[in-house]
Amino acid sequence: MRTLALVAALAAVPLAAPFAAQAQSSAPIDPAKLSGHTRVLAGPEFHGRAPGGPGEQPTVDYVVAQFKALGLKPAGDDGGWTQAVPLIRTQVQPDPKITLSVGGQAQALTQNKEVRLHALRPDPRVQVTDAPLVWVGYGVTAPERGWDDFKGVDLNGKVALFLINDPDFEAEASDPVAGQFGGKAATYYARWTYKYEEAVRRGAVGALIVHETAGAAYGWSTVTASNGESFDVQRADPAKEKLAFEGWIQRDLAVDLFRRAGLDFEAEKVRARTAAFTPVALKDATVSVDLNVASEKLMSRNILAALPGKTRPRESIMYAAHWDGYGVGPADAQGQTVRPGALDDAIGVGGVIEIARAFVEGPRPDRTIVFAAWTAEERGLLGSEYYAENPSYPLASTVANFTLDVLQPLGPSRDVVLVGAGQNELEQHLAYAAARQTRVVTPDARPDRALFYRADHFSLAKRGVPVLLLMALGGAPDLVEGGRAAGDRWVAEYTARCYHQTCDAWSADWDLRGAAQDVALVYEAGRMLATSRRWPQWNAGSEFKAVRDRTASQRK
C-alpha cells in the first residue's frame, strides 16, 4: 500500500465542499525567519544542544521567548512552559569483560569491535555468568499477522539472539512471507527497540542483535558512534523494564557462533522467514559479562505551548520537532568539536515556531493547537516518549501529530517526500495541500531504512495518535533546479558527511524556499483539521490501528 499509486489515488478523491474551500489558502511561511531561527539555535553559544549540557538553558530560553512573543499559552508542568523529563545517562566503563563460550571453549570479545554492549539500569556493576544463548530469529510476535517467533520459549535468565529487521525483509517473491510485513518497507517489528522490549517482556537477562548493514540501514560505525553513552528516562523499577545488558554483535561473529553450535547461519535465516520457525537454544553456548557502569541522573525539559481552541479546546492538534542535538564530540579533521545540528533539527524547531505564528495571525481555530520542542530525540526519542506517558492533552483526543525533522536547504521542489506513506488518512490532507501548491507527494524511496520508526512522532503513533513525518532524508526531492539527481546528491553527501557531525551547520548560502513550502504544507493540513470535526483514521493493516480503535468512545 505504501506506494506512489496510493498517494495519487488519495489526491484524486473529490473534496467535500467545506474541505475544498478550506484548502484554498496557504500559510505565508517566511524562509528568512526559518533561516534566522536555525542560525541562532545552531550558534556556538548553544554548544550543540545536548540534553543536560550547557546549551540546554539558552535553547529553552530562546524557544520560550518566541512562544511568549506570539501570545501562546504555556502547556507544560504546573502552568509553565516546560515539562521536566528525568533522564539517566549511563556509560559502560573501559575494558569490560565479555566472554562467549561454545562447547567449553571461551572467546574474549572486545567492546566496539566484535560487540557493542550497553546497560540502562542504574547499577554500578552488571555481572551475568554463563547465561544460555537462545536463537529467536526475528523475535516477532504479531497476532494481526498470524506470527509468533517465540512459541512459548522460556527466556528467563537467558540471552535472546535476534536478527535485525523483520521476517520478509530478505524474502524472495515466491516465499509465503513475502509482503506479510510490508516487503522492503520496515514495520515496527524491524526496529531494535522493539526487539529489546520483547526480550524484557519474556524475562530475558540480555539481548543481542546480529548487525547486518542492509537490515539495520546503517553500518557498524553508527552502532559505536555514541561515545559509549546511553540514555533512558528514569524508571520506577528499572529491573522490570530494562534488560541487564543489551547490544549488537558483528555478523561474522554470529556466523562463527552458529557454525560452532552446529548450525548454518544462512539456513537459519531462511527458516526464520517462515511462520513455523521455532527458537533454538544454541548448543553449549553461553555469554558472560562483567561491566562497570557509570550512571548519572539529570533533568532535561520538553518545551510546550498551546493556542487554545475557541469551541472544542479539549481536542488538540500537535506540531513538534526536537530541540536537542549531539552536543560536543571528538574533534574532526579541522579540530571542530561542536555538532551544531542545524538541519537536524534546529530548522524543524524554527518551522514549529513559524507554524505557531501562522495560526496566531490567522482565524482562531476551533481545536487547540499544541506546539512542542522535544528533548533527547537523539538519545532514543526520550522526550517525546516521556510526554506520551505524561501528556498535557489526552492522546485519545489528540487529532494528529505533525513532526518536522530535517528540512532540505536547496530551494523549491516539485514534490514533498512523505516518510511512512500508506499509514493513515493524514496523507489525504497533505496531498490536498500539496495540490494547492501545484506539487505532489512522493513516498519515501527507502522505506527499508525504517525512518518512520526513528523520529519523535513514533512515540505518539505507537499509542494510536495519527501522525505525519516530513524528513528530507526519506528520499531525494525533485528540485526545480537540478531535479531528483541534484536532490540525490545532497541526501548522499549530507548523510555521509554532515549527519550528526560538525558540518551540520547553518549556512548563509541556503535557499530555504523549499523548506518553507514544506512547513506550509503541514500547517495547511493541520489547519483543515483545526476547523473541522474530522478524526483521521489509521489505514487497515497498520500496526497502530487497533491501539487507536480501543479509545474510539472518547472521540465524538
Image (cartoon, grey):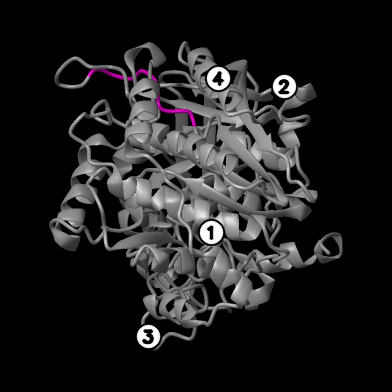
What residue do we see at 67% from left, 23% from top?
A: 81
For mark 3, give the secondary structure: loop
Q: Which residue range is magenta in the image?
A: 323-331
Q: Which mark lies nearer to you, 2 or 1? A: 1
Magenta stretch containing residue 322, yes or no?
no
For mark 1, give the secondary structure: helix
User: Residue 522: where, in percent of width, then height?
Assistant: 49, 53
Label 1 and label 3: CA atoms lie apart by: 37 Å
Local crowd size for mark 1, using a 10 Å CA cut-off: few (<14), some (14–19), many (≥20): many
Q: Amino acid at mark 2?
A: Gly
Q: Residue furthest right?
A: 553
Work out whether residue 347 or residue 152 is closer to the camera in this orientation and state it. 347
| Relative vertical location of residue 446 with respect to residue 42 in this rendering, above or below | below
- Asked if the residue under mark 1 is in contact with the one under mark 2, i.e. CB atoms within 8 Å, the reply is no
Residue beneath disc 3: 173
Q: Earlier in the sequence, mark 3 or mark 4?
A: 4
Residue beneath disc 4: 65
Local crowd size for mark 3, using a 10 Å CA cut-off: few (<14), some (14–19), many (≥20): few
Residue beneath disc 2: 80
Q: Earlier in the sequence, mark 1 or mark 3?
A: 3
Residue beneath disc 1: 525
User: Residue 392: where, in percent of width, then height?
Assistant: 75, 37
Q: Which mark lies nearer to you, 3 or 2? A: 2
